[in-house]
Amino acid sequence: MNYTFELKELQATHIVYLHHQGDISFIPSSIRKLMQWAGPKGLITGPANKLISVYQHEGKELSVDIGLTVPQEVEGESEISKGLLSGGLYAIGHFEIGTDEIPAAWSLMYTLTSKHQCKPCAGKSFEIYQSIPLDQHPQDKCMIDLCIPVQMIDLKLIEEKAISILTECDTAMLASVTEEGYPRPVPMGKIKADGISQIWFSTGTFSDKTIQFQLNPKAGVCFMKGGDSIVLTGKVEIVSDMEIKKALWSDWMFAHFPGGVIDPSYCILKFTSEEATYWIDNEFVKASPFSGGLAAERTKLLQLAEKIVTENYKLLVTE
């Protein structure tokens, strides 16, 4: 997928639009109506005029505003409304893709947003079509910008809360990967933690999980308290250093390893995290609202509208 990503402050943008909620089969006719209205006014070919789709949820339905960016002085008429897209900080993805790739592009945007220490905030997400008609592109791809209003995440505060939760948890879920490629989560008592970056567990040298980590060190750790949870992914190291094993030994372990520290069955697993996903204070650090059914609906919408947009654009610019 060909794209670039940036965080950028955008100015408020004036638009004219037709609003739709529910049945998307009517949207192509709205695009035709909007372009037929805008063409004679010179609102299609100007460098500041871009076709856009603005999305928001109204109850369980996805509503769509099909619009054009316009100068401030342009007013709507009849069912064509005038609106304003709020300015502020946006995560913006510049994509060169086919219409069938747009749902995956939206999912990627929310992943990239989280990785850049941002989260979606109040406001409307929208698409800006930089290449209309689509046949201007030699491979019939869209030049499209996906824009999400965001705010910066206070990762330090979130990590502090996560560490506090882990400190209060005696047990965490540790997942290995079986030879068949399935995750195998097992509740484990933690014996030491260095923040959330490293967590130590004790287990049997010849246990299934130890053997699985020898074959594949990839692992996951999950712990929770109340309504908050943290999921970590990373790798497990089987510790052989006797000084570390001595430092982590506790007398309660005699019940499992009668030979003490030198018991050949006594094993220490050291988990080192590489990625974290937080659900803290009823909020995900990562989110992808445009997934599943809504993403599929938007793909159908674009495929229905593509031909009509292109044909009407050609008609209007040649009149």
Image: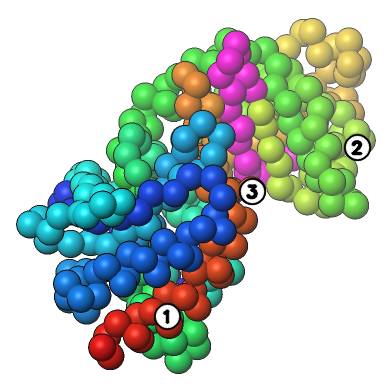
Q: Which residue is mark 1?
A: 310
Q: Which residues are magenta?
A: 223-242
Q: Amino acid at mark 2?
A: Asp
User: In percent of the image, x 53 and y 75: which residue is there?
Assistant: 98
Identify the secondary structure beneath mark 2.
helix
- Whether residue 186 sits left or right of residue 126 in the image: it is right
Residue 116 place in picture, x, y as percent: 38, 48
Of the numbered discs 1 and 2, the one sitting upstream in the chain is: 2
Colour scheme of the picture: rainbow
- Whether residue 118 sits left or right of residue 274 in the image: it is left
Q: Amino acid at mark 1?
A: Thr
From the viewer's perspective, is residue 18 above or below residue 124?
A: below
Identify the secondary structure beneath mark 3.
helix
Q: Kindly tell me whether residue 211 is visible in this rendering.
A: yes
Residue 127 place in picture, x, y as percent: 38, 59
Foreground mark, 3 or 2, reads 3
Mark 1: few, some, or many residues within 10 Å (few <14, many ≥20)?
some
Q: Which residue is mark 2?
A: 208
The answer to whether the residue labelled 3 contacts the one labelled 1, judged by CB atoms less than 8 Å apart, is: no
Q: Which residue is mark 3?
A: 292
From the viewer's perspective, is residue 95 above or below residue 239?
A: below
Foreground mark, 3 or 1, reads 1
Identify the secondary structure beneath mark 1.
helix
Residue 178 place in picture, x, y as percent: 87, 46
- Residue 52 magenta-highlighted: no
- Whether residue 308 sits left or right of residue 13 in the image: it is right
User: In percent of the image, x 42 and y 80: which residue is there?
Assistant: 310
Residue 66 place in picture, x, y as percent: 37, 57
Query: Which quarter of the rendered picture does the C terminus lie within?
Result: bottom left
